[in-house]
Amino acid sequence: MDMGGPGWELWRTFDAVMREGSLSSAARALGLTQPTAGRHIAELEATLSTGGLFTRSARGLQPTEAARVLAPHAEAMAAAAAALVRIASAPTDVAAGVVRISASEVIGAEVLPPILTTLHTAHPGLTLELLLTNASSDLLRRDADLAIRMTQPKQQALLARSVGRIRLGLYARRDYLARSGPITRTADLAHHAVIGFDRDAASLRTINAVWPDLPAFALRTDNQLAHIAAVRAGFGIGVLQDPIARRDPELLPVLREAFTAHLPVWIAMHEDLKSTHRMRIVFDALVAGMAAHVGAVPDMEWS
């Protein structure tokens, strides 16, 4: 049956141009020549009734309003195509093939490496893709196969398991506290270098909820890895996950009783993947590994 409309290769090139900002960069990302990528865009524009998709400028190709409207749908097609390739990478009943995991930058860089190392040592046939983003990946759209989330997933089509809560606290390096003076009450923080967020409204709301008299920040960054690195370097006082801070004997808690907050931890995947053996193996490994990080006893029963 003739479905009509542009073929996937045209949409694939369109999605790459939207992401990369130029024909040459999109062509390199897709393994095409630049003339081929340009021909794909021209053919797509000729097929559609929306008019031109890009205008040329000194900064490269600028998407038109029509392109911006189409872009989310092309992204969804690309995510679905990538998921199809992952599912087809191995039979569903073996511990081999590709599994894509989404996690925050901190979890991906600070917590997951030993968990994934143990997992891959036990199952060397697995190929693991790690997507680090502080935004929630859309599992229904198949941006990833599994996700570690710090909020409870709401979608009905997801299989999700809670593995406990991570306590957050204020920490500073030992030598910083030695040279900057004691901190016995929250008012003392006004005289210290506090590391905080820049434009991350959600994080600022979370901190303000448990710390309404927030002092001015001496360093602002929305990159959580930079936040951790600044505390470790002795810049000042910042919010860290307790399990991460406890690894470094040079980091000491500050105002332990006055400031506390928690991050819930959930492992989630699309329920359609439950019957795929490698997905279940990785799901269980993430549940066990994150529960150990949190200090909880994991529930390993499948519902």
Image (tube, rainbow, N blue to C red):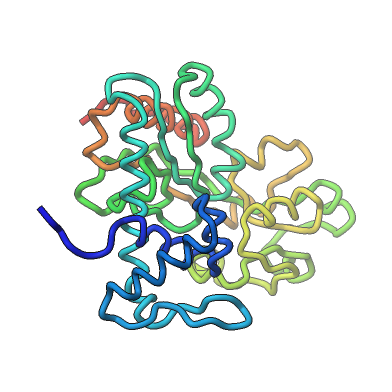
In this rendered view, identify the residue nearer to me: 184 or 170.
170
Q: Is residue 252 above or below residue 8?
A: above
Q: Is residue 216 above or below residue 263?
A: below
Q: Position of residue 91 (x, y in %)?
A: 30, 24
Q: Is residue 299 left or right of residue 231?
A: left
Q: Position of residue 78 (x, y in %)?
A: 36, 54
Snapshot quadrant of residue 67: bottom left
Q: Position of residue 235 (x, y in %)?
A: 80, 58
In this rendered view, identify the residue nearer to me: 144 or 157.
144
Residue in view at x 27 percent, y 20 percent = 93
Seen as rendered, the residue at the extreme right is 179
Residue in view at x 72 percent, y 64 percent = 194
In this rendered view, identify the residue nearer to me: 124 or 189.
124
Q: Is residue 14 left or right of residue 2?
A: right
Quadrant that contains the C terminus: top left
Residue in view at x 87 percent, y 51 percent = 178
Residue in view at x 26 percent, y 54 percent = 154
Seen as rendered, the residue at the extreme top is 122
Q: Is residue 7 left or right of residue 214?
A: left
In this rendered view, identify the residue nearer to me: 58 or 161.
58
Seen as rendered, the residue at the extreme left is 1
Q: Position of residue 132 (x, y in %)?
A: 52, 49
